Structure formats: structure tokens, C-alpha cells
């Protein structure tokens, strides 16, 4: 039986086959375009994304498939023929910042947090979907005629590929439209954001019998990418935590039961739910700019080769130089979209290498802030498992471990989202897999964290104060 994971990500679609030894073998990777037609607008072509998923499926020879999606990226399409009625609006898009700010001024924040477990932020799908209904004439016309479909990209893929207009409970929990306690669309939330509830897909489990795909393969798992990565890291018990360093840095910690939203700024979310089984919950927190900040600095000419930024003497924050990586705002636990990035503490003796050292440290320090906020609600147990491009930078990982004061587990498997998909699908198919996870442990040197976090917090507050005009 051939089990294949198709990871439909922010910049590419990748297909990987699961071997009998539990390891993944790449099949193909297909890039796709991303456009920025206006400041803050980030869009993709739905047909291009679907074509890449279909091409991956056709090339894979799969019997059983797991499919991941980008999470908060969403679109509108026609129920009659599946035709997209506008672009995919990416999770990175903040065109609705004014909408969410207005709702916050109207006092809607506590209700949204209490029901959806999410803050009012354009990162999530609800305000984007409401914007489509208001601003795109074809979408409004389809809504009036009763043949509009709205959803995250997974619902579009599944509608076109399986004929089932469905999403999974983990992806739905990232929209701001689902009631976390019931696992159903919430009528009041839909009304608040201007999203017609009848245009939304059916919410179902993350794994099970999810439909037949073109060519006869079975869709056995469909889930948002970060939750798939959490599963791929082997995090199953409360307190087990992972951080994925991609475009942004995304931390999640398994809780088992639902943890009520709190002042910590950390978000409760659905981790997964097997068909017929209970819902497993998690805590979620993101740093908006990680690899995107590094790539931005490279484009500015601060370095040419990644080997140049893999080793430094001392720590920049210890000598008073800090970088706040809020290039597209501050995510968890601060939720301040108006903040922007900055270096603080620069002197005439600082050069490109110092700027890059501080930038890497800033990403690590923001990650530690997120994990510290999580620990207030769910104690982190054991090592924190990390993956993604920055997990291969020895300076970054060493600084992160030392500042966090906790061991890190660096997985040898580069594709943890795909690993989670494949393992979910294998469980549905009844295929046993090895329990071992290849990787190495990075030990922390104790004692550096508190002073570094205090200095970084001062820098972050300075950035926030500048953004607010205070």
C-alpha cells in the first residue's frame, strides 16, 4: 500500500511517499506564484494551487493520501462549477486590519475570544471571507443567488477533488467562525464578520474516510499544516511542544482538553480529531516573521551565504544590541499589527554581521516569549522539538536553547508536516510504523535567559510605543 503526503504550503506543493521504515521519500515539489497587488495584499491563484495538488496526486501513484493546507488562506468559488470567484487571500494578507480594528473598538473582541479562542486579527480567515462578500461583485452576486461557497483552501481542494464540500475541525478552528466548544460554525460570529453561514463547508474530522480522489486513491487525512507538523513531531501528550521555523515561527503545545482563553495572549485551538474519536486540543502561538526576516536581510545585502550567519562570538543582546522582528506586526502574545521591525542599541562599531546576529536572536527571543506565555496555561514537558530552515543554523539553535533554558530536539526529518500527514493516513489504513524519531538533542547552558528577555522586552516596548505615537 502506497501512502503519500501532499503538503500544500505557502510557497510550494510537495509530495512525499512513506517508506516501510517510517521515512519519507520525496516525489516532487512544485512552486507557485504569490502576488502583492497592493500594500498588505498577498494573493495566490486557486487554480494554480489545485493544479499542483492534482499533479502531485497523479505523479505519486498513491493508494492513501494525506493532504495539508495553509491554514488561514481562503477564497470564494461557485458551487455550480467550482470556478474561483477571486484570488486566494493568503494568511499573510492584512487588508482587513481596519475591519478588525473597527470591530475591536465596537467591543467585539471578548465575544470572539470566548467563542472562537482567537483575537481580532486579519491573520485569521473570517474578516477576509467577509471582505470578499462585501468587495468582490461576483462573490456578492453568487451569495444573493444562493450558489456561493466560501472556505479555506482545503475545502476548495476537497470540493473539486472528492466532490465533498468539507473542511476539518482543526482548520475550521483557525477561521474565527467556529465555536471551539461545539466544533460547529457559530451563527453570531458569522453575522459579526458578514459571512453567510450557509456558504461554509461541513466541518468533519481530520482523519478517516474523507472521500475518493481522482485515480482511485483514498483521502485519509486533511488538516492544517501546523497541526500536521505537531503530529509529525510525535507530540501526543499534554505539555509536548514543537516549534516550526518557516516563513514565520509557529509554536504549538498539546493540552488534551480545551483550555479557556486567558490574558496570556496564547490561543487555544483544535489539534486533531480522528473519525469517531474525541477532539484533542492544543495551544498555539506564532511569530509572523522568521525565515521571511532572514530572506529580507539577505535581499538588503547584509549577507550572501548562510554559512556567514551560522556562527558568532558572544551574544548581541548581551552587549545591548537588539532586533525586534515585527516586520509585519507582533503576533502572540502581544497581537499588535501596527508594530514594525527595528534594530536598537546600534553603535558606530556595529556592522552587517552584528545586524544579522541581532536579527537571528530577535526571532529566537520572540519564540521564547511565545513559549513562556504558553507555559502559563500548560506546563511544557520535556524537550521542545523544532524543525524548519532555522533549526539547521547552529548559532540560532544554541542561542534559543540557552535563552529558553531547555533542551531542544532537532529532528533529522526535514518534512514534519508531511510526516504528520503520512502517519495520520497510515493509522487510518492500519499500517504499523516504527515509533523511533531520528534526531539529536541540544543541551542548554543555564542562566542567560532572564536578562536577555528583560532587555528584549524593553526593545519591544520601545517599538510598540513608536508605532502608537506614545
Image (tube, helix red, strand yellow):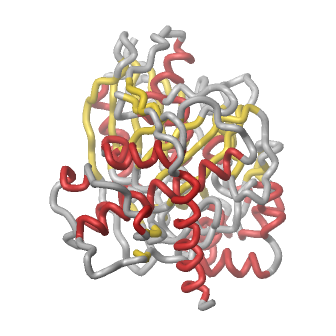
Quarter residue 55 falls in: top left
The image quadrant that residue 359 belongs to is: bottom left
> On the rendered image, what quadrant is the C terminus found in?
bottom right
For image coordinates 40% across by 50% down, the residue present is 246
Is residue 228 visible in the rendered image? The answer is: no
Q: Which sits in the foreground, 246 or 140?
A: 246
**As drawn, is 460 to the left or to the right of 327?**
right
Q: Residue at x 72, y 40 (%)?
A: 378
The answer to whether residue 367 shows anywhere in this view is yes
Furthest residue to the bottom? Answer: 469
- Where is residue 80 drawn, in percent x and y? 55, 53
Residue 313 x %, y %: 29, 54
User: Whole-percent x and y of residue 409?
Assistant: 45, 31
Quadrant where the N terminus is found in the figure: top left
Q: Is residue 336 above or below residue 189?
A: below
Q: Position of residue 126 (x, y in %)?
A: 65, 63
Residue at screen point 47% across, 11% down: 433
- The answer to whether residue 412 is above or below residue 98 is above
Q: Between 357 and 466, which is closer to the camera in this rendering?
A: 357
Residue at horizontal 43 percent and vertical 70 percent from the top: 320
16 with respect to 197 (left or right): left
Amino acid at each position: 500500500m502506497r501512502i503519500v503526503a501532499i503538503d500544500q504550503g505557502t510557497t510550494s506543493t510537495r509530495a512525499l511517499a512513506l517508506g516501510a521504515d517510517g521515512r519519507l521519500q520525496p516525489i516532487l515539489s512544485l512552486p507557485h506564484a504569490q502576488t502583492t497587488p497592493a500594500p498588505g495584499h498577498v494573493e495566490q491563484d486557486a487554480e494554480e494551487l489545485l493544479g499542483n495538488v492534482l499533479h502531485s496526486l497523479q505523479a505519486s501513484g498513491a493508494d492513501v493520501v494525506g493532504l495539508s493546507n495553509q491554514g488561514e488562506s481562503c477564497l470564494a468559488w461557485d458551487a455550480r462549477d467550482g470556478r474561483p470567484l477571486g484570488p486566494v487571500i493568503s494568511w499573510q494578507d492584512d487588508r482587513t486590519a481596519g475591519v478588525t480594528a473597527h470591530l475591536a473598538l465596537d467591543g467585539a473582541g471578548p465575544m470572539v475570544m470566548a467563542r472562537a479562542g482567537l483575537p481580532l486579527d486579519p491573520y485569521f480567515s473570517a474578516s477576509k471571507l467577509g471582505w470578499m462578500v462585501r468587495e468582490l461583485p461576483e462573490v456578492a452576486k453568487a451569495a444573493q443567488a444562493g450558489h456561493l461557497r466560501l472556505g479555506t483552501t482545503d475545502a476548495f481542494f476537497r470540493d473539486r477533488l472528492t466532490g465533498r464540500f468539507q473542511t476539518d475541525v482543526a482548520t475550521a478552528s483557525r477561521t474565527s467562525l467556529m465555536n471551539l466548544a461545539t466544533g460547529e460554525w457559530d451563527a453570531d460570529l458569522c453575522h459579526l464578520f458578514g459571512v453567510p453561514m450557509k456558504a461554509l463547508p461541513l466541518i468533519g474530522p481530520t482523519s478517516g474516510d474523507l472521500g475518493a480522489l481522482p485515480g482511485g486513491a483514498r483521502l485519509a487525512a486533511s488538516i492544517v499544516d501546523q497541526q500536521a507538523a505537531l503530529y509529525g513531531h510525535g507530540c501526543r501528550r499534554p505539555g509536548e511542544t514543537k516549534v516550526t521555523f518557516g516563513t514565520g515561527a509557529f509554536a504549538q503545545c498539546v493540552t488534551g482538553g480545551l483550555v479557556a482563553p486567558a490574558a496570556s495572549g496564547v490561543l487555544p485551538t483544535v489539534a486533531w480529531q480522528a473519525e469517531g474519536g474525541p477532539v484533542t486540543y492544543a495551544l498555539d502561538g506564532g511569530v509572523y516573521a522568521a525565515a521571511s526576516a532572514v530572506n529580507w536581510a539577505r535581499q538588503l545585502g547584509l549577507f550572501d551565504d548562510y554559512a556567514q550567519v551560522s556562527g558568532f562570538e558572544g551574544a548581541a543582546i548581551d552587549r545591548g544590541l537588539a532586533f525586534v522582528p515585527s516586520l509585519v506586526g507582533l503576533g502572540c502574545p502581544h497581537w499588535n499589527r501596527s508594530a514594525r521591525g527595528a534594530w536598537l542599541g546600534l553603535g558606530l562599531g556595529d556592522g552587517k554581521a552584528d545586524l544579522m546576529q541581532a536579527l537571528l536572536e530577535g526571532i529566537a527571543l520572540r519564540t521564547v516569549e511565545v513559549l513562556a506565555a504558553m507555559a502559563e496555561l500548560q506546563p511544557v514537558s520535556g524537550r521542545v522539538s523544532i524543525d524548519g530552515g532555522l533549526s539547521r543554523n547552529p548559532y540560532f539553535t544554541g542561542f534559543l536553547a540557552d535563552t529558553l533554558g531547555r533542551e531542544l530536539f532537532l529532528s533529522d526529518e526535514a518534512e514534519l508536516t508531511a510526516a504528520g500527514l503520512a502517519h495520520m493516513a497510515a493509522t487510518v489504513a492500519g499500517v504499523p510504523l516504527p515509533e523511533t524519531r531520528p534526531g539529536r538533542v541540544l543541551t542548554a547552558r543555564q542562566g542567560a535567559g532572564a536578562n536577555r528577555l528583560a532587555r528584549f522586552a524593553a526593545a519591544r516596548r520601545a517599538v510598540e510605543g513608536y508605532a502608537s505615537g506614545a
